[in-house]
Amino acid sequence: MDYYKLLGVGKSASPEEIKKAYRKLALKHHPDRNKGNKEAEEQFKKISEAYAVLSDKEKRQQYDTVGSAGFQQRYSQEDIFRNADLGDILREFGINFGGGRATFRSAGTGGGIFEEMFRQPGAGGRAGHGFQDFRQPQQVKGNDLSLELPITLNEVLTGAEKTISLGRGSAAEKVSVKIPAGIETGKKLRVSGKGSPSPMGGPPGDLYLLIRVEPHPTITREGSHLTMDLQIPYSSAVFGAEVEVPTLEGKQLKVKVPPGCQPQAKLRLRKHGLPDSQGGTRGDLLVKILVAVPKALSDEQKELMDKLKESGL
């Protein structure tokens, strides 16, 4: 879905131009002016979604960065309309939202994203002011489903395509899901139309996959940066050395440890971390130096250590 094309504006359009375009189109496709016109109803929903994204600086930046398909994967419709300030414009049509911000029902409740905004009078919400025919029973959407999806740190690095099974036995449906690089624990991916079927002939709900990045045995994550420990002998810390550092993608990088390197010092390997949350620039790999203390010494080593001790080391 091209939000700019829906509103008829260019990608460089200012917030004022976007608002002006939405106001004009919302008036044209407003259900009160198009009684029984399902096409106008759908277009009104689409332009409202476009305005909710393009009027929000952060969401617009995300949309411009990852494109329509990537944005739809990262943002649920609940996320899209959260804090969407449609009230000022829609009040021009006689709809009063009190505080000025439209309220949208949370995902998974079985209603469409406009359930609260266009709720009929007497249904426990605000009156719809002419929208009583907007939601017919057969249009009720099925419930959304949520599943946890564990992924590895390597899959965060490169992105991945995973196949999940919905249902059991021979009736199970295989669904392929693309995991964008740089994704973090707690993010949700939406798979349209793979939720519960509608009990009243409407569209099925959506499937939301909650991402959980599994721990790595030797590497920890800090945003787009990675951290790992590296043990070196005492002599290497004193005199310096060239050591090999294993990276997440399986490479062995040769790194110089400077003479006099202190325990817990960190060496920074630039752009050997993870892609950022937009799948772009990679973070760094931070190598924390640990000085290995031997548990047992040979006689020769003991003699040398005694001499070092006498010299004050």
Image (cartoon, grey):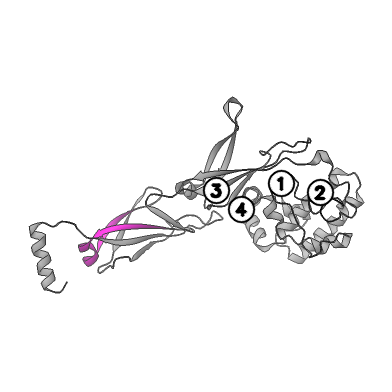
Residue 20: image location, x then y, percent? 81, 63
The answer to whether the residue labelled 1 contacts the one labelled 3, judged by CB atoms less than 8 Å apart, is: no
2 or 1: tag closer to the N-terminus: 2
Residues rendered magenta in the picture: 226-245
**Residue depth check, mark 2 versus mark 4: number of the one nearer the observer:** 2
- Compare residues 134 and 24 and report the one nearer the observer: 134
CA gap, disc 2 to disc 3?
32 Å
1 or 4: tag closer to the N-terminus: 4
**Residue depth check, mark 2 versus mark 3: number of the one nearer the observer:** 3
Report which quarter residue 87 is drawn in: bottom right
Within 10 Å of disc 3 (Cα), the crowding (few <14, some 14-19, many 20+) is some
Q: Which residue is mark 1?
A: 109
3 or 4: tag closer to the N-terminus: 4
- Compare residues 47 and 139 and report the one nearer the observer: 139
CA gap, disc 2 to disc 4?
24 Å
Q: Secondary structure at mark 1?
A: loop
Q: Secondary structure at mark 4?
A: helix
The verdict on residue 241 being magenta is yes
Amino acid type at image mark 4: Val
As drawn, 57 above or below 164: below
Q: Which residue is mark 2?
A: 43
Q: Which residue is mark 3?
A: 211
Write the residue at 12% across / 74% down.
311
**Residue depth check, mark 3 versus mark 4: number of the one nearer the observer:** 3
> What label does residue 219 carry, if any?
none
Amino acid type at image mark 2: Gln
2 or 3: tag closer to the N-terminus: 2
1 or 3: tag closer to the N-terminus: 1
Write the residue at 75% across / 50% down.
113
